[in-house]
Image: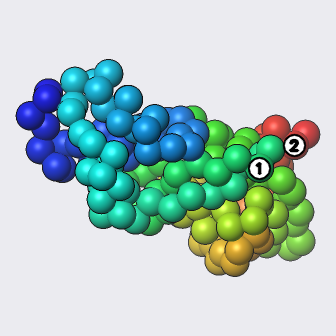
Amino acid sequence: MSRASKAQRQQVISDLLAAEAITSQDQIVDHLAEQGVTATQATVSRDLEDLSAIKVRMPGGASAYAIPDHPHEQVVPAGHLRRIFSEWVVGVDSSGNMVVLRTLVGSAHVVASAIDRSGLDEVLGTVAGDDTLFVVAAQGFTGEAVAELFRSYADLG
């Protein structure tokens, strides 16, 4: 795959960022090389910009790349949603049909995007700020029921 097209290379990068906490462009270059794709750090930098990748703070203070704005048609697998929650959600509360999620600073939009793309029947929609997001429970679900689901994803008991 050393002659990978730009779209193929960017798909590999997108899949990598969805699967692992990647903290540097050099890690991406190395991963691409393991996949048989030759790319320089400058190429990876341009690819990250094209993908609208951003760096978000993780537990412990390290920063990792994330792509917050995937197309809405692309559904997030349950395992990816659990990883997002376990890495970035630090608190879950509810009231009525609302859930309030607290995240690491600068991460609320990443979590909201993952929820929006998850296809969860329990969720009507999200509104994100910097480190807090609101989730509206869908008709027939309570905020507490959705909060319990999210607590399990985030391992918050």
| Percent coordinates x, y for residue 54 in the rendering | 51, 61
Any part of residue 39 in sight: yes
Q: Is residue 138 left or right of residue 150?
A: left
- Identify the disc placed on residue 156: 2
In the rendering, at what x and y percent does residue 61 appear? Answer: 77, 50
* Viewport quadrant of the C terminus: top right
Total numbered labels: 2
The image quadrant that residue 53 belongs to is bottom left
31 relative to 95 in the view: left or right = left
| Left or right of 12 in this view: 80 | right
Look at label 1 and name its amino acid.
Answer: Gly
Mark in the foreground, 2 or 1: 1
Q: Residue at x 12, y 44 (%)?
A: 5
Classify residue 106 by image quadrant: bottom right
Name the spot of residue 134 as percent of width and height, x first.
Answer: 73, 73
Q: Nearer the viewer, residue 142 or 16?
A: 16
> Can residue 144 be seen at all in this image of the molecule?
no
Quadrant position of residue 92: bottom right
* Above or below, 135 relative to 103: below
Q: CA distance from mark 2 to mark 1?
A: 19 Å
